[in-house]
């Protein structure tokens, strides 16, 4: 159950996610295990390591800066509160935190959407274009380039579908409408796309 | 059917399932190890996609979070066999929260449910079939309703007749200040159809105290004790008639 028992493949992904800083491969897991014991200094360190990714992803999905700050705060407090539930055998700390992050951001989108007129196709298209522009500016590190290269390996439909779902926070039903593609096709493209990304990025099975 | 549900793993890992379909997939996930492995891998993969979005955190936000941590109690570790159940329950919290917001206007949910995928409906019907309650009313139809993990619910009514009964399994007890309230929605307008408490043993059976004929949707919310004239709480159970 300890981080030391993790399969080595998991730490490969972690190294890339964290950056090649020469630190121990399981540093984020180890930090999180310290956080679970109530270590606030470890939490501050964890915040400095992962906060930028959390805030960045929330902003990508939500756009609105003040809402994004609010949701980021909720997520980081949730990480603090539930750190003891992190199970290193079930995946990396990075995935645990980013999964929580993405879900929170998307839930915020969904709950707002429900009380709003849904038809904003043009806006969604712009979101994707803006992502391309922004990501050109930021793809400086290895990890960014790797992700970008992996996205380039997808078919255009896989890529559009994955980007609209992940960065745009759209449901697969909305993606199907935006891309004017049958639901079943979108569902399988999302899965195929993830499988290809998984293989390209070397995420361990 | 299982094969079809399998295909949802990608959309699920990208959080691209609508709230109701997500709840059904999670019900399936709890019983399907193949999907669990798939979802774990896809979640690792999806997490990597976050890297290019990274942005500096505004310093006041960092201070606020660190301040807040000072006064926030942490959860104790989950132990042994409860672990998986806890994970699922945790996963359900945002579902409930999302639904609560979605249903400020109950009409919003009508759309969701109307869209609900046929595969999911079939799965839902199969789950419900295990607790088959049809036949409570002679010649009645049982409409399976969307419900949180651990709860099975259906609405039994006879088409063309103005009567109906909610049947639910697994509803949690509520705090004394709260009650469950049944609603029937006519032309987008919720009509109060009775407040109730869960039965201690066996199914909770609630006859609708409002016009069933012509209702397009049935829903259950949690409300302040005594009930309210218009729904204010989270929608726990819902479905179209």
Image (cartoon, helix red, strand yellow):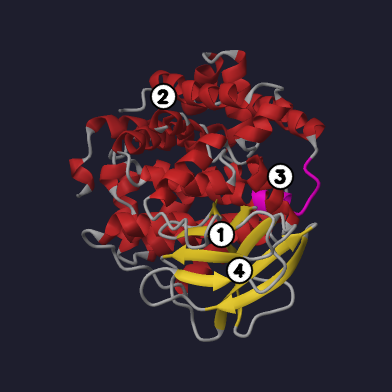
Asked if badges 1 and 2 are on one and the same chain, I answer no
Q: Residues within 10 Å of mark 2 (few under 14, many from 20)?
A: many
Q: Residues within 10 Å of mark 1 (few under 14, many from 20)?
A: many
Q: CA distance from mark 4 to mark 1?
A: 15 Å
Asked if badges 3 and 1 are on one and the same chain, I answer no
In the foreground, B160 or B104:
B160
Residue topped by disc 2 = A198
Q: Which of the two marks, 1 or 2, is nearer to us in this view? A: 1
Chain letter for the residue marked with disc 4 in the picture: B
Residue topped by disc 1 = B155
- Give the vertical position of A49 relative to A119 (above or below): below
Q: Which of the two marks, 3 or 2, is nearer to us in this view? A: 2
N-term-proximal mark, 4 vs 1: 1
Q: CA distance from mark 3 to mark 2?
A: 27 Å
- From the top left corner, tell me how far across and down residue B162 is, in percent: 69, 64
In the foreground, B222 or B88:
B222
> Magenta region: which residues?
A110-118
């Amino acid at each position: 159950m300890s981080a030391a028992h993790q399969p080595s493949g998991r730490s490969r992904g972690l190294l890339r996610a964290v950056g090649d800083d020469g630190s121990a491969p399981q540093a984020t897991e180890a930090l999180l295990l310290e956080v679970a014991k109530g270590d606030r200094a470890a939490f501050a360190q964890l915040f400095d390591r992962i906060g930028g990714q959390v805030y960045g992803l929330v902003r990508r999905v939500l756009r609105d800066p003040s809402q994004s700050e609010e949701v980021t705060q909720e997520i980081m407090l949730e990480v603090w509160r539930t750190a003891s539930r992190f199970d290193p055998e079930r995946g990396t700390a990075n995935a645990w935190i980013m999964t929580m992050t993405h879900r929170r951001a998307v839930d915020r989108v969904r709950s707002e959407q429900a009380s709003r007129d849904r038809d904003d196709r043009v806006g969604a298209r712009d979101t994707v274009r803006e992502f391309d522009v922004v990501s050109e500016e930021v793809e400086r590190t290895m990890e960014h380039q790797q992700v970008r290269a992996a996205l380039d390996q997808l078919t255009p439909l896989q890529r559009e579908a994955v980007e609209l779902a992940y960065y745009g926070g759209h449901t697969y039903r909305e993606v199907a409408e935006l891309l004017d593609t049958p639901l079943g096709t979108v569902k399988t493209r999302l899965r195929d796309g993830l499988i290809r990304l998984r293989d390209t990025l070397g995420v361990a099975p | 059917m299982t094969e079809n549900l399998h295909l949802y793993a990608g959309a699920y890992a990208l959080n691209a399932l609508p709230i109701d379909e997500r709840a059904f997939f999670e019900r399936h996930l709890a019983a399907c190890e193949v999907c669990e492995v798939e979802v774990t891998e896809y979640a690792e993969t999806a997490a990597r996609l976050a890297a290019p979005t990274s942005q500096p955190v505004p310093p006041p936000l960092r201070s606020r979070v660190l301040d807040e941590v000072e006064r926030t109690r942490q959860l104790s570790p989950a132990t042994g066999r409860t672990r998986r159940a806890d994970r699922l329950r945790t996963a359900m919290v945002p579902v409930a929260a999302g639904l609560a917001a979605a249903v400020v206007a109950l009409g919003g949910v009508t759309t969701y449910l109307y869209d609900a995928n046929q595969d999911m409906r079939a799965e839902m019907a199969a789950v419900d079939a295990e607790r088959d309650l049809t036949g409570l009313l002679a010649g009645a139809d049982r409409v399976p309703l969307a419900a949180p993990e651990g709860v099975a619910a259906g609405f039994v009514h006879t088409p063309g007749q103005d009567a109906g009964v909610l049947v639910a399994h697994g509803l949690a007890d509520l705090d004394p200040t709260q009650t469950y309230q049944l609603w029937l929605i006519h032309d987008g307008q919720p009509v109060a159809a009775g407040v109730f408490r869960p039965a201690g043993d066996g199914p909770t059976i609630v006859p609708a105290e409002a016009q069933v004929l012509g209702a397009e949707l049935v829903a259950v919310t949690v409300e302040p004790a005594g009930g309210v004239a218009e729904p204010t709480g989270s929608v726990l159970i819902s479905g179209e008639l």
